[in-house]
Image (tube, rainbow, N blue to C red):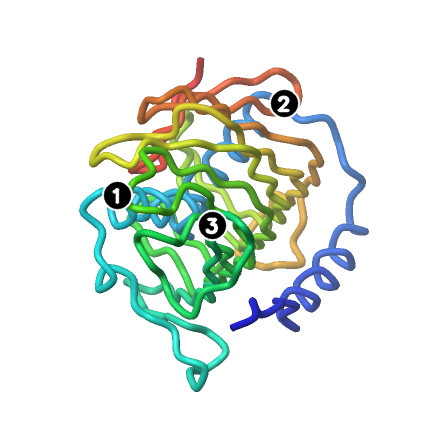
Amino acid sequence: MRLAKLVPAALLAASMISGCAKSATAPQPMSQSDADDVAQQIAVTSTGTGWGSFVLNYRGSLGPQAAPARVRPLRATRAAWDTSWTSGFLSYAFSLAFYTPGGLELPQYDPILTWRIEETSSVTGSIQRTDFQADLFHAGQLSFTGARASDDTLAFSGTAHDTAFTHFTSDVRQVERWFHIDLVRTISNVTIPKTQGAYPTSGSVTWVVQAQRLRSGSRADVEATFDGTATLTFDGTRYPTLTITGGWRYRVDLVSGAITRL
């Protein structure tokens, strides 16, 4: 099965809407309070859309105990998305292709032969928490290596595009916020041991950020616009460091999405 290419119309529409609305206010430098808001949105939407939780799930399912039944086999007659499910208010869809170390494509996951997995993902829906709500869209591609059951470490790289309309209470300052945020994500050489309870030991994720702070729940009520970058650097713990334009640094909880200033 060839890996499907994902060019969703919804992503193009979101980009066009974002571009039109940004003309309402010119980008301005990011203060620490602005960085607080951006950091919280990156942390919550990333753990919510699954690049963190889904990868943490892979670490166990592709470990030494893996068997063919742990990863559902692909069939040529299946729909474009090979596996999909709904969790809470989010709908996940993944298309997977499996390869040997020599690049031979396999019809399904084989715990002995499958060294590389190419994944295309889509996540749509909303995050509904007491302190954070968001309507979001995610589209991404990941390449995993070390997928054989005998491999002790999983490595992955890839790209993604996330857009979200958010309403939340700041973790740091306890103020109410509305935002529209656009995130282009690059995942670079992240490695994670395939043992239960492990977290990424090395690598990083970088986001190019375009964010609009809104005065209210109206998408057109733009108060300020911020552009910048954010980089999450892994260190083998549950709490890697996020650095945002301006030098603002945060500790991120990979499980809950909570942030703490450093």
Closest to the camera, between mark 2 and mark 3, is 3
Q: Which residue is mark 1?
A: 63
Q: Which mark is residue 116?
A: 3
Mark 2 and mark 3 lie on one chain; the one further toward the N terminus is: 2
Q: Dot 2: within a 10 Å radius of its alpha carbon, few (fewer than 14), some, or many (20 or more) residues? A: few
Q: Residue at x 50, y 24 (%)?
A: 233
195 with respect to 175 (left or right): left
What number is the disc on residue 87? none
Circle 3 SS class: strand
Q: Is residue 76 above or below residue 60?
A: below
Q: Is residue 48 above or below residue 96?
A: above
Against 241, is 103 above or below? below
Looking at the image, which is closer to me, 30 or 11? 11
Q: Amino acid at mark 1?
A: Gly
Other residues around mark 3 within 10 Å, as few (<14) / some (14–19) / many (≥20):
many
Nearer to the camera, 35 or 222: 35
Q: From the viewer's perspective, is 232 left or right of 127?
A: right
Sequence-earlier tag: 3 or 1: 1
Residue drawn at x 59%, y 25% as measured from the top left: 244
Q: Position of residue 211 (x, y in %)?
A: 64, 43
For residue 31, the mark is 2
Residue 218: % across, % down: 58, 59
Q: Secondary structure at mark 1?
A: loop
Asked whether the residues under the numbered discs 2 and 3 touch, taking CB atoms below 8 Å apart as contact, a structural biologist would say no
How many numbered circles does the render carry?
Answer: 3
Distance in Å between CA atoms under marks 3 and 1: 14 Å
Residue 34, given in percent of the width and then of the height, sits at: 58, 29
Amino acid identity at mark 2? Ser
**Amino acid under label 3?**
Arg
